[in-house]
Image (tube, rainbow, N blue to C red):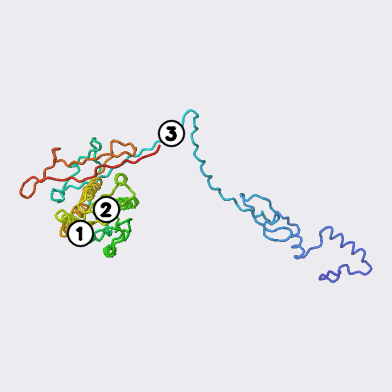
């Protein structure tokens, strides 16, 4: 190895290599020989400690991450292991309510309050059937089983009707069938567009021609089917019971327009059972329309006529006591439900008659009260509705000539209370 200087070679003498070598080693040991810049840089890098360069690792030179205070967990020569931070847990659900301790000596009791409300539809008319408007709540007095009641709600209703037209159509007398159809068509003519009507006829059993509809054409179409009768029996009680049973599932106020002779020939039910059914049925008013009066009056003066022998088809002559009994039954059905029975004598009466029924249905007073007898014992309770004046006496109504007019108050005779089994 040769190290050159300006003055030539170091030493300059031959044969003095051992001494020169010794001198070089001494100089190196004593630091007398200068070092180049490259060597100085290498020595500086080697002398530095890892603490002086925190951004690099001593082995691979990769950047080292600073450990955040909240990280935690094990670390290596690069940085801490990535440990996901736990999410805040949802609040635990509230504990279930703790039921109070039951004492052995004290039984459990529950209190239930059921306050019934009785609705009564009242029709107030003159003797000629004209509706009397303008009455107030204070003009009505309701008495239940002899005890005055406090009227809590009062309303004058004029609303669409929900009615069933129940027609007797059997192989009895041609006159009866014609009058039944005339009365049915007259009722259909009195309907309005918002009314709901179902049509049913009966002979040996009831037959539904059309269910509740607001289509007048459907009602006319149902009546047009009544052309050829089938059986001669007229089972009035069975048909009326079936109709009332179906109306139990219809909400609101309902009406039954019963077009019939009133004669029942072959029903399985008795009069007592149909009377009980009417008492137990709520929100239903029956308006019976009698047919056959023309023929009955004719047979009173012509008992031997061919048309009067077996007019009803079952050996029951016209003018027999069964017809009078049927009239009384129709009056009773109407009185029990707050309706009126009509006995037209000729066809010209029918439009006016159904006009009266329409006014009766669409113009009436509705009263509601909570009965003082709140027992739910299923008993039948008699009702009486009175119309009084401002002074508490009978209401006085005068006609256009100033004469007193007698008024009629039509309301149901009573109702059956609900029955609760303890």
Q: Quadrant of residue 418?
A: top left
In this view of the protein, which residue sits in the foreground, 205 or 379? 205
Local packing at callout 2 (Cα closer than 10 Å; few below 14, some 14-19, many 20+) is many
Q: Earlier in the sequence, mark 1 or mark 3?
A: 3
CB-based contact (under 8 Å), mark 1 and mark 2: no
Image coordinates for residue 272, horizontal then vertical, percent: 30, 44
Residue at image coords 42%, 36%: 110
Image coordinates for residue 164, horizontal then vertical, percent: 28, 55
For the residues labelled 3 and 2, the Cα–Cα distance comes to: 45 Å
In terms of secondary structure, where does tag 3 sit? loop
For the residues labelled 1 and 2, the Cα–Cα distance comes to: 30 Å
Give the residue pinned by disc 1.
307
Q: Earlier in the sequence, mark 1 or mark 2?
A: 2
Q: Is residue 410 above or below residue 63?
A: above
Q: Nearer the viewer, mark 3 or mark 2?
A: 2
For the residues labelled 1 and 3, the Cα–Cα distance comes to: 72 Å
> Quarter holding the C terminus?
top left
Give the residue pinned by disc 2.
256
In terms of secondary structure, where does tag 1 sit? helix
Local packing at callout 3 (Cα closer than 10 Å; few below 14, some 14-19, many 20+) is few
Name the disc covering residue 248, or none.
none
In this view of the protein, which residue sits in the foreground, 293 or 344? 293
Local packing at callout 1 (Cα closer than 10 Å; few below 14, some 14-19, many 20+) is some
């Amino acid at each position: 190895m040769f190290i050159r200087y300006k003055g030539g070679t170091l030493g300059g003498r031959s044969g003095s290599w051992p001494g020169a070598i010794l001198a070089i080693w001494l100089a190196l040991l004593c630091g007398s020989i200068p070092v180049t810049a490259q060597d100085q840089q290498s020595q500086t890098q080697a002398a530095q400690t890892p603490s002086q360069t925190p951004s690099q690792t001593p082995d691979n030179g990769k950047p080292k991450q600073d450990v955040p205070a909240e990280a935690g967990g094990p670390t290596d020569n690069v940085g801490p292991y990535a440990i996901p931070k736990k999410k805040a847990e949802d609040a635990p659900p509230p504990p279930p309510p703790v039921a109070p301790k039951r004492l052995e000596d004290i039984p459990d009791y529950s209190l239930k309050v059921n306050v019934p409300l009785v609705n009564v539809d009242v029709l107030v008319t003159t003797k000629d059937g004209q509706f009397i408007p303008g009455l107030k709540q204070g003009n009505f007095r309701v008495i239940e089983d002899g005890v005055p009641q406090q009227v809590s709600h009062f309303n004058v209703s004029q609303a669409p009707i929900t009615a069933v037209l129940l027609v007797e159509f059997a192989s009895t007398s041609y006159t009866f069938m014609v009058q039944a159809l005339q009365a049915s068509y007259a009722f259909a003519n009195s309907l309005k567009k918002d009314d709901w009507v179902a049509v049913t006829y009966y002979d040996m059993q009831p037959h539904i021609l059309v269910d509740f509809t607001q289509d007048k054409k459907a009602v006319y179409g149902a009546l047009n089917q009544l052309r050829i009768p089938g059986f001669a029996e007229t089972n009035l009680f069975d048909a009326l019971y079936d109709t009332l049973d179906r109306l139990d599932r219809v909400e609101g106020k309902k009406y039954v327009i019963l077009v019939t002779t009133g004669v029942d020939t072959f029903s399985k039910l008795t009069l007592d059972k149909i009377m009980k059914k009417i008492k137990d049925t709520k929100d239903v008013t029956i308006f019976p329309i009698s047919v056959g009066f023309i023929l009955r009056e004719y047979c009173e003066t012509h008992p031997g006529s061919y048309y009067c022998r077996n007019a009803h088809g079952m050996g029951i002559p016209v003018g027999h006591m069964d017809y009078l009994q049927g009239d009384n039954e129709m009056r009773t059905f109407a009185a029990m439900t707050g309706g009126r029975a009509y006995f037209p004598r000729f066809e010209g009466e029918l439009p006016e008659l159904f006009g009266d029924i329409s006014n009766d249905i669409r113009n009436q007073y509705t009263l509601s009260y909570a009965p003082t007898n709140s027992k739910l014992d299923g008993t039948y309770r008699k009702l009486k509705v009175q119309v009084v004046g401002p002074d508490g006496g009978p209401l006085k109504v005068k006609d256009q000539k100033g004469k007193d007019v007698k008024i009629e108050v039509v309301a149901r005779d009573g109702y059956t209370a609900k029955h609760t089994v303890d």
